[in-house]
Image (tube, grey):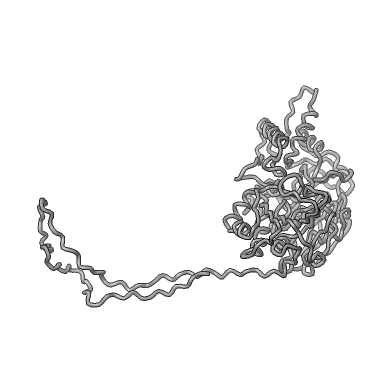
Amino acid sequence: MGMTMVEKILAKATNLAKVKANDVVEPKVDLAMSHENGALVINQFKEIYQDTGLEAKIWDPGKIAIIFDHRVPAESSKTATNQKKIREFVAKQGITKFHDIRGDEGGICHQILPENGYILPGTVVVGTDSHTTSHGALGAFSFGIGATEMAAVWALGKVLNVEVPGTIKVVVNGDLPERVEPKDIILHLIGRLTSEGANFKVIEFHGQTIRKMSTSGRLVLCNMTVEAGATSGIVPPDAETVRYLKQEAGVKHLPELFGPDSDALYDQVVEIDAAKLEPQIAFPHTVDNVKPVGAAKGIKVQQIVIGSCTNGRLDDLAIAASILKGKKVARGVRMLVFPASTRIYQQALKKGYLETFMAAGAVVMNSGCGPCLGVHQGALADGDKALATTNRNFKGRMGNPNAEVYLCSSATAAASAISGEITDPRTIVIARTKPAVKKPKAKIAKPKVAVKKPKAKTAKPKAAVKKPKAKTAKPKAAVKKPNAKIAKPKAAVKRPKVKTTKAKGKPVRKTAKKGRK
């Protein structure tokens, strides 16, 4: 039998001809990512070298990425001190893929990695965050690990004791209906599989819908595979992968692309007809408690959140802005918008999306994780209900166990902000902006020479005036016509009227599923 996508990646990373599910391997790592929890990794890393007499040195500084995103700017002195500790470590170790709290290169780690070209197809990526699964969208085997495991990676450059996961093949065909998004596909899938239906497995995406989907949409799918218990999600690389990496991420040299074998063995095959999907809602307090949007009709919400590593990209902001344009966020509703990176923030600013949000009454926040994990920005009050494009709705997720969080797409979030209750986005009429009409350039018939009889120039008293041969200016004398034909002012030249139109991690090893972030 052939190999799945992840089996082929792991075989390559271990220099083995073939691997299969349940084998235990130790693959070389191509990229290791941490965020603010890098402070804990540093502690574990230094312990490895304690009493050895050896210098604590990272195996390859060029393969480490650290991004501040969970608590930006720092919300406490403890966070600020940990961030300072990481900055000092980064400088000492020579880590260049470091994204501090900045307006030119900051953002959420799972957006920063792909948009900067740090992720390449066929590679092994690990991160101290369970949503590291996102980067399978670019054809990498990307998964979350703990701080102790990451410390070993920093020291050795490989992940220890990885059990090769089995794979679930998900085939999605058909065209998505209007205002049904990739978020609705993955919520539907999680609802079918349940939160433990893909435990310690990889979800491999195929089908016509996936091939036509943008990289942004694929990131949504892979990001949330962990909510079904999966170790990772992955989309075999194709023309869209190449387009994104070259045109958007600025990658100049790509590795040789490969996909799964046609006779690969899968644990399960799931088929989805995208054309039959409708907007989905994940009800509290589990992500697999998924129902069609109609089941949530009339549920009033106090907070709307658009953003996060799941749905904070430019296309998410574009559809939300198109729904909100010319409308207002309902009174009593707080709407927070978090662009996933400062690059996206700047693009949205240029396109006028942020202006649309603010005119509607939304608050545009800095790029970061915001209230998603419940420790920074946008915490909920007792009894509040929030509707969010984030990826988790566990009890207490937005900072209050006495509140409720519902999950949805960016279109559903924007539509619900207008009504103040969970609303099917297909019921909202989008204001169509009339195309700007260019004012035609007025074609005015110019006279051959515009004539006004010049006032006779009177010679100044002390100046010697040399009389020109052809033109002699005498006081109060009629001006002699020059050789050029001058239209006599017999009739005033009429200017035609111009008609103008006013333009209107989880860890790979089978361990208890606790404390995921």
- Residue 192 seen from this side: yes
As displayed, is residue 353 above or below residue 178? above
Quadrant position of residue 59: top right
Q: Is residue 442 left or right of residue 222?
A: left
Q: Is residue 403 left or right of residue 365?
A: right
From where the camera sits, is residue 7 visible?
no
Of residues 32 and 13, the one drawn nearer to the viewer in this rendering? 32
**Residue at position x 84%, y 47% in the image:** 18
Quadrant containing the C terminus is top right
User: Would you place residue 128 above or below residue 245 in this image?
Assistant: above
Q: Viewer-proximal residue, 226 or 302?
A: 302
Q: Position of residue 431 (x, y in %)?
A: 62, 69
Give the percent coordinates (x, y) of residue 341. 65, 49
Residue under the point 10% across and 50% down: 462
Residue 460, image quadrant: bottom left
Residue drawn where x is 77% and y is 33% of the image: 155
